[in-house]
Image (tube, rainbow, N blue to C red):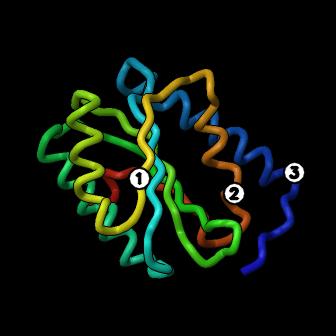
Amino acid sequence: MIYNESNVLDIRYREELGKWFNNYSLENFGSDWDFIVGLGYKLNIKSESYYRRKLKNLYEVLKNLDSKIEGIFVNEWDSSFDRLHHHLLIKTNLKEYDFKYMLMKYWKSLGMSDIKKYNPNLKYSSYITKHLNKTSNNSWDFLSNLN
């Protein structure tokens, strides 16, 4: 897999999408995202149906605790292009401890998870769009679209 060269339109798309991600929570929920999440796999995952099923199952586990939970996920290949990982922006009514506990409990058999409180000053929304359009495998979607 080789990254496509970025043209001006791709760069602008990623910048605008990052801004849109950042503002989405404010416009739709009245406040910033609550958490940023990184999810990696132990195994070499290349199947879209597999990772979508695992993310959907995680979303269902969390949705059982908070029916209004929402998020955006971005798929990204690691630097060697053989292992997929995800970046997520999460909006939830769950307390930090409960959210972290349930997410880590579910994901620990699949791989690693990194969960932090959202800080709008860190520009995480722009960071997670940095590889979109560089390959067909680098994509994004809403968690609620996994149903």
Horizontal side of residue 140 vs 18, given as left or right: left
User: Pointer 2: what residue?
Assistant: 131
Residue beneath disc 1: 113
Comparing marks 3 and 1, which lies closer to the viewer? 1
Q: Secondary structure at mark 1?
A: strand
- Mark 2 packing: few (<14 Cα in 10 Å), some, or many (20+)? many
Q: Earlier in the sequence, mark 3 or mark 2?
A: 3
Identify residue for label 3: 8
Q: What secondary structure is found at the residue carrying circle 3?
A: helix
* Inter-mark Cα distance, 2 to 1: 20 Å
Q: Nearer the viewer, mark 2 or mark 1?
A: 1
**How far across and down, in percent of the image, does residue 113 sit?**
41, 53
Secondary structure found at label 2: loop
Q: Earlier in the sequence, mark 2 or mark 1?
A: 1
In the rendered structure, which amino acid carries the disc numbered 3?
Val
Mark 3 Cα shell of 10 Å, populated few (<14), some (14-19), many (≥20):
few
